[in-house]
C-alpha cells in the first residue's frame, strides 16, 4: 500500500467516525446553486463559498472551463436536481495559462510521461512513446482570465439546453488573498431573462 493510500484511508476512517446524520442529506443541493471552478488544489470551494455538505454542486476541471462535459453537468444540476443559480469561478496563477493547445499536443507527441517547466517553458522527458491524439483536442487554455470567464459564461448562456431564467455569475478567485473578484461583463452576459 502506498503512503498516499494509507493517508486517504486513515482520513476516511476518521471522517466516518464523525459522519453523524449526513447519510440523510437529500440528493438535490440544499442551497440550489452550482459552481464551475478549477481543479487546482489551492482552491477550496467549500471554504471560499461557505459551503457545507449538501449545499451546492461543485463541478471541477482544468481551468474551470465550460467544456461540453461541464455544461452537461450544469444542465443535469438544474434539470434533475433543481439548481437555480450558477457561478463560473476561474483563478489567478492558473496552470492553464502556462501552455497552449499546440504545446500540449507537442508534449504528448513526444512522451506520455510527466513534463517539466522552467523559465524557458515546458520540456518533455522524451521517455517512452507518445501519441498524436493530443493534437486533436482543444485544451481550453487561458491567455486572459477575465476574457476566459466571460467566454465561458457566454458559452453556457448560448447553449440551447440552458434556460434563460438561470443567472450565471462570473468571478476570479485570487490565490494570494482568497478574494472572489467579480467579472462584471461576465455576470452581465449571464443575466437571467
Image (cartoon, rainbow, N blue to C red):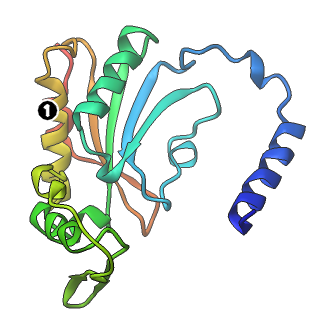
Say whether residue 157 is left or right of residue 180.
left
Which quadrant would the N terminus be assigned to in this image?
bottom right
Can residue 115 be seen from the camera position used here?
Answer: yes
- From what the image shows, is residue 133 above or below residue 56? below
- Return the x and y of residue 179 as percentages of the image width and height: 42, 56
Q: Image point 64% across, 34% down: which residue?
A: 52
Say whether residue 150 is left or right of residue 39.
left
Count of numbered circles on the image: 1
Q: Image point 12% across, 33% down: which residue?
A: 154
Image-quadrant location for residue 40 = bottom left
- From what the image shows, is residue 149 above or below residue 103? above
- Return the x and y of residue 70 as percentages of the image width and height: 31, 33
Which quadrant would the C terminus be assigned to in this image?
top left
Comparing 135 with 52, the one in front is: 135
| Element under disc 1 | helix
Q: Image point 32% across, 46% down: which residue?
A: 64
Can residue 172 be seen from the camera position used here?
Answer: no
Comparing 76 with 162, the one in front is: 76
- Return the x and y of residue 14 as percentages of the image width and height: 85, 47
- Return the x and y of residue 5 as percentages of the image width and height: 71, 58
Task: Name the residue that disc number 1 marks.
Answer: 155
Residue pushed farthest front?
129
Say whether residue 14 is left or right of residue 112.
right
Amino acid at each position: 500500500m502506498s503512503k498516499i493510500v494509507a493517508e486517504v484511508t486513515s482520513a476516511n476512517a476518521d471522517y466516518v467516525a464523525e459522519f453523524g446524520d449526513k447519510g440523510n442529506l437529500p440528493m438535490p443541493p440544499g442551497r440550489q446553486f452550482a459552481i464551475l471552478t478549477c481543479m487546482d488544489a489551492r482552491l477550496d470551494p467549500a471554504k471560499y463559498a461557505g459551503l457545507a455538505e449538501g449545499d451546492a454542486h461543485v463541478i471541477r476541471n482544468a481551468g474551470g472551463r465550460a467544456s461540453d462535459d461541464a455544461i452537461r453537468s450544469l444542465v443535469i444540476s438544474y434539470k434533475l436536481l433543481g439548481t437555480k443559480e450558477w457561478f463560473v469561478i476561474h483563478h489567478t496563477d492558473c496552470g492553464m495559462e502556462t501552455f497552449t493547445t499546440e504545446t500540449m499536443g507537442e508534449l504528448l507527441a513526444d512522451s506520455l510521461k510527466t513534463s517539466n517547466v522552467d523559465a524557458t517553458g515546458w520540456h518533455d522527458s522524451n521517455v517512452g512513446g507518445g501519441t498524436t491524439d493530443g493534437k486533436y483536442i482543444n485544451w481550453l487554455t487561458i491567455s486572459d482570465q477575465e476574457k476566459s470567464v466571460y467566454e465561458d459564461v457566454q458559452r453556457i448562456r448560448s447553449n440551447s439546453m440552458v434556460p434563460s431564467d438561470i443567472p450565471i455569475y462570473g468571478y476570479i478567485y485570487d490565490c494570494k488573498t482568497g478574494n472572489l473578484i467579480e467579472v462584471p461583463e461576465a455576470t452581465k452576459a449571464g443575466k437571467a431573462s
